[in-house]
Image (cartoon, rainbow, N blue to C red):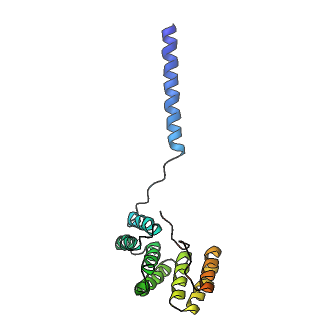
């Protein structure tokens, strides 16, 4: 009888463990990796941009846009990477900011970066237009852009970085 009781107890313990494991696995699933075209290249570009490796980030954002030309965030961050490589790239940067805003008119970061670019190019009126648009989208970024326009200097850091996925 003792052997039978031990076996029955062991069976119940194993069964309870399996049931608990099954429920635990279903209660907190791992987040799924974003498999949209261009996302892995985009995320790699963001990391490079955060390390100030703008030429390498540029290549990643361009690769992301080959796979997904409608990725507004990649256009925005490509514009930033180009802008950080000097005035010779300003026209291309502006084109990408414009494309980002056309694709996603609510992408506050693109207004921030484009406004800074307009300021750097000496077009304060256009920078102020972006500030007005930004005010309704993201007050923190609007304040940062206003400070940049007032000082005439590019803000430190990545205030307008579009997020990673």
In this rendering, the answer to whether 154 lies above or below 49 is: below
Residue 74 lies, in percent from the top left, at: 44, 73
* Place of residue 160 in the rendered image (x, y in percent of width and height, measured from the top left): 54, 74
Q: What percent of the width, then of the height, locates residue 150?
A: 63, 86
Nearer to the camera, 118 or 17: 118
Give the number of marks.
0
29 up-or-down from 155: above or below: above
Is 89 placed above or below 107 here?
below
Residue shown at the point (47%, 84%) measured from the top left? 98
Instruction: Residue 37: name its quadrant.
Output: bottom left
> Viewed as shown, does residue 140 lie left or right of 164?
right
Which x, y percent locates residue 12?
A: 52, 23
Q: Give the residue furthest to the top.
A: 1
Vertically, is 151 above or below 63? below
Q: Can residue 136 be seen?
A: no
For residue 90, what is the image quadrant?
A: bottom left
Query: Quick check: can you spot residue 50?
Result: yes
Residue at image coords 51%, 43%: 26
In the rendered structure, the answer to whether residue 143 lies left or right of residue 17 reads right
Query: Residue at (43%, 64%) from the top-left corner?
Result: 43
Q: Nearer the viewer, residue 49 or 44?
A: 49
């Amino acid at each position: 009888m003792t052997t039978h009781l031990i076996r029955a107890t062991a069976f119940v313990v194993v069964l309870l463990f399996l049931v608990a494991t099954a429920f635990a696995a279903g209660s907190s699933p791992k987040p799924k990796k974003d498999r949209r075209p261009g996302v892995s290249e985009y995320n790699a570009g963001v990391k490079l941009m955060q390390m100030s490796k703008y030429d390498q980030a540029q290549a990643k954002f361009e690769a992301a846009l080959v796979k997904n030309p409608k990725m507004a965030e990649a256009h925005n961050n490509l514009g930033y990477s180009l802008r950080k490589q000097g005035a010779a790239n300003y026209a291309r940067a502006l084109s990408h900011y414009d494309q980002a805003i056309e694709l996603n008119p609510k992408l506050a970061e693109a207004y921030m970066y484009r406004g800074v670019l307009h300021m750097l190019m000496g077009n304060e009126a256009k920078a102020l237009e972006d500030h007005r648009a930004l005010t309704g989208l993201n007050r923190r970024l609007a304040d940062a852009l206003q400070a940049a326009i007032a000082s005439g200097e590019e803000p430190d850091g990545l205030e307008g970085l579009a997020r990673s996925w």
